[in-house]
Amino acid sequence: MAQVITDPQETDTELCEQGHDLIRSVLERIGDKWSVVVICKLADTTRGFNELRRLSGPSPITQRMLSTTLRRLERDGLVTRTVHNTKPPRVDYALTARGLSLLGIVQSLARWAEDNSGGILDSRTTFDAEHA
C-alpha cells in the first residue's frame, strides 16, 4: 500500500532522521574530499587515470587514493570504467547518468561553500576565540 504524503517538509525531516545505513554511506561517499573532485573533473568529458590525477589540485591525490575513490564511485554506479586494448593499456573514466544527476548537486554545494566561506571563517574565528 502506498503511503500518502501530506507534508513534503515533514517527509524530508523524517528521511534525514532515519539514518539508514545506505543513505549514510552514500552521503559519506559523495561528501569525501576526493569523490567531489573526481565528479567535478568528469563533468564534461571522459578522462584517463593520470589526467584525473594531474587535475586533482595543488596537492595531488595519490595513485592509491584515486584508485580507491574511482573504484567506490564505480561500485555506486556513478562512474564507468572503460579499458582500451592498446599498448600501453589505457583506462578511461566517465560519469554515468546517475553521476551526472549528482553533478549539479555537488556543484551547488560547492557554490554554497564558496558563497558562505567568509562567514564560516568568521564564525570559526569567533567560536575558537570564545572557547580557547
Image: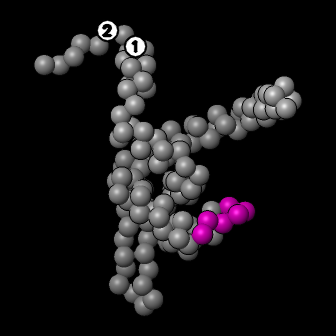
> Relative to residue 85, is residue 63 depicted above or below?
above
Q: Residue 63 carries which label?
A: none
- Amino acid type assigned to the residue bearing label 1 in the image: Glu
Say whether residue 40 is visible: no
| Corner quadrant of residue 9 | top left
At x 50% / y 72%, what residue is drawn? 48
At mark 1, the secondary structure is: helix
Give the main secondary structure, helix, strand or loop, of the magenta stretch: loop
Q: Quadrant of the C terminus?
A: top right
Above-or-below relation of 85 to 80: below
Q: Which residue lies furthest to the left in this view?
A: 1
| Residue 40 appears left or right of 99 | right
Q: Position of residue 57 (x, y in %)?
A: 68, 61
Say whether marks 1 and 2 touch (CB < 8 Å). yes
Q: Is 61 inside the magenta-drawn segment?
A: yes
Label 1 belongs to which residue?
A: 10
* Residue, disc 2: 6
Magenta residues, start to end: 57-62
Give the image location of residue 8, x and y in percent.
38, 15
The N terminus - image quarter: top left
